[in-house]
Amino acid sequence: MSQALLTASNITRRFGGLTAINNVSLTLTQGTVHAVIGTNGAGKSTLVSVLSGEIPPNEGRIMMGNNDITQWPQPRRAQAGMGRSYQRTTIFPSLTVHENCRIAAQANHQHFWRWFQPASHCKESNSAADRALALAGLENEATRTAGLLSHGAKRQLEIAMSLATHPRVLLLDEPLAGMGPEETERMLDLLATLKAEHAILLIEHDMEAVFRIADIITVMVNGTVIAHGDPDAIRNDPQVQIAYLGDDE
Ligand SMILES: Nc1ncnc2c1ncn2[C@@H]1O[C@H](COP(=O)(O)OP(=O)(O)OP(=O)(O)O)[C@@H](O)[C@H]1O
């Protein structure tokens, strides 16, 4: 049976008088791509920020396994197996692809004193970087300067950097943004491969891609979940059609 790796219950986040997410619950399960879709401003990125520990919720609880991580800061969540990618690329452009991954691995390392060693001497970080690049299909780009990669490969590198920290839960905020059709296909293949070992939360505007790759879809409007189910159920949900998909679907 699939394993629930993260459970968020009744999450609410307000910014002043605005309720950006309102009583949202979801479970992320190993072997599952769980997409969250919704119109602009629906609260998708806020949800990812709350789950990742970037901002605290006003209400609700987040569990990873048996741990209540609601109050945990980001680094502790990362060490517990949470990886996150952002809407914009966050790589170090002047370093090589491998160095980017190695630094990500080392930053997640629990041994503080190893910061005083040159990163290149850290065997564990090097092998974590090798593994992450292989998983992300970037092993042939290891020695390239990251800033010279194509846009799609940069996004792949971001995911590789996240994989270098050995996450079990991956929170991906618009990994397909700005990609051409070939790059999109490569990324979707990568997500399909990664889901076997991970629980993936996918925020994405590319509806065709979402309906192809997602196992479960949560639909948000104005901070509230209006539907939740498999792609067929969501496609045929009258409320979703009216509120979100409109004539496009
Ligand atoms: N730091 C903030 N301070 C104040 N309001 C915010 C903040 N972050 C988000 N919001 C507001 O919260 C609401 C939800 O925003 P959010 O970015 O989560 O939506 P989204 O679904 O990710 O949108 P998009 O698809 O455009 O990225 C919006 O009304 C937004 O203006």
Image (tube, rainbow, N blue to C red):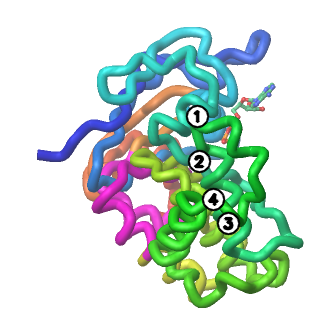
**Residue pictured at 77% horizontal, 76% vertical:** 96
Circle 2 sits on which residue?
84
Q: How dense is the environment of label 3, judged by Cα within 10 Å: few (below 14), some, or many (20 and up)? A: some
Where disc 3 sits, the SS reads loop
Q: How dense is the environment of label 2, judged by Cα within 10 Å: few (below 14), some, or many (20 and up)? A: many
User: Which is nearer the N-term, disc 4 or disc 2?
Assistant: 2
**Residue pictured at 72% horizontal, 85% vertical:** 143
Residue 43 image position (x, y, % from top left): 62, 34
Q: CA distance from mark 2 to mark 1?
A: 7 Å
User: Which is nearer the N-term, disc 3 or disc 1?
Assistant: 1
Where disc 1 sits, the SS reads helix
Circle 4 sits on which residue?
122
Circle 1 sits on which residue?
52
| 3 or 1: mark nearer the eye | 1
* Three-letter code, disc 2: Arg
Q: Is mark 4 within 8 Å of ligand 1?
A: no
Where disc 4 sits, the SS reads loop
